[in-house]
Image (cartoon, grey):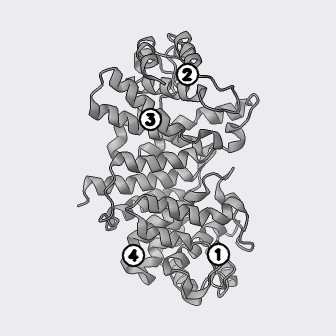
Amino acid sequence: MKKPRDTFLSEIVAALSLMMDFSENRKLYHAWRVAILSEKLSQKLFPNYRTEMFYAGLLHDIGAISLPYHIVHYEKIEKPCKSSILFNHPQKSANIVKNLGFLFLASDIILDHHERWDGSGYPRGISGNDITLGGQILRISDTVDVLLRDNFTSLGNIKKKLLLQRGKEFSDKIYEAMEVTLDENDFFDNIISEESISQIVLKIMKNLTPPNMVPFESEMDEIVKVFADVIDAKHNYTAGHSKRVAIYTYNIAKALGIPEEQAKKLKVAGYLHDAGKVAIPRAILDKPGRLTMDEYKLIKNHPVFTMEIMSMIHCLKDMVIIAGSHHERYDGMGYPGRLSRDTIPLGGRIMAIADAYDAMTSERPYQNKRNSVEAKDILIKNSRSQFDPEIVKVAVKVLS
């Protein structure tokens, strides 16, 4: 039976990968499908590293989070990309995963996931068995998912396209193992079914041996900070936003007399409150002018996406509605639920103030940066309408 700590780690990685695969109003399931394919293939080729392969699959593209759109919209099988963010994302992904500590073995696998058997891959341009076996498995798994999005949805067409890359993108051994894997029972039908993917991922997480925990000593707070860095990397102007909101939320909570344990959980919710913003294209969030109705509707959905992502992490279930209510208003004119007054969770009312304060005191494309005094005056002015007046009275004393 898995320990609570192991369960938390598994769930937060799965949630992080789901967050990366949100694109506007839909889930692309790219990382989940690559993880499923990689784990399945590793049963034949790399059985002692099935856990590392699965989690490497979940996080292999985490370094591409700052792209304007999801990475699957850029990938081309025939023309490996060698431009800026795409070229560097395997290295960046590997570095982020290494910082998680407990997945340090997966980082080397991720580094190689765009290397090709013939040496024409990136970022290092290595070839043959100089590429880690795990990297080779990730490469063909990634390719299969991209092909599924390129109008080659039948198994026969997928195999034909893979055959064209045999000896170029991947070795004969890797190709043959994938061909056998795709032919097994109803495996192919299951991986192309969005209804089946989440069930398969949860089953694998339940049955796999937990990641190696020996070098990992960080607490939940430290892991979630990595999560926050990834969220904030989506947009240049949001650097550090989630961390600051988490700290402001914690400080206000403590000033209100909220017990330490609960205040710490509110801090974690602050780190994750904008997870759903990863689904919003940069062109919308960075837009300096007025949003269209459709753009604003998409923006208003980001707390809903946040709640769906956080719902995967069992020990944070009581924080889901709090993180998802940071855009509700005291007067009931906020979103996504148009909650008002005490129907907004206390933590949500606190976080709304923390979020607004940081937005006002940071550089944003759509408004001028205010100093702390100006921002506090605006909080006071908007108490009873946007913000809980009693919390504002306390917040302006501790925010700086």
- Against 296, is 162 above or below? below
Q: Which residue is mark 3?
A: 246
Q: Earlier in the sequence, mark 3 or mark 1?
A: 1
Quadrant (top left, top right, bottom left, bottom right) of the N terminus = bottom left
Q: Which residue is mark 2?
A: 372
Residue 163 location, quadrant:
bottom right
Image coordinates for residue 246, horizontal then vertical, percent: 44, 35
Image coordinates for residue 277, horizontal then vertical, percent: 58, 41
x 48%, y 52%: residue = 16
Q: Which residue is mark 4?
A: 49
- Label 3 to label 2, Cα distance in Å? 17 Å
Image coordinates for residue 337, horizontal then vertical, percent: 51, 26
Q: Which residue is mark 1?
A: 158
x 46%, y 57%: residue = 198
Asked whether the beta carbons under mark 3 and mark 2 sit within 8 Å of each other, the answer is no
Q: Nearer the viewer, residue 126 or 195?
A: 126
Element on which disc 3 rests:
helix
Q: Earlier in the sequence, mark 3 or mark 2?
A: 3
Task: Say few, some or many: other residues with alpha carbon within 10 Å of mark 4 (under 14 / 14 to 19 / 20 or more).
Answer: some
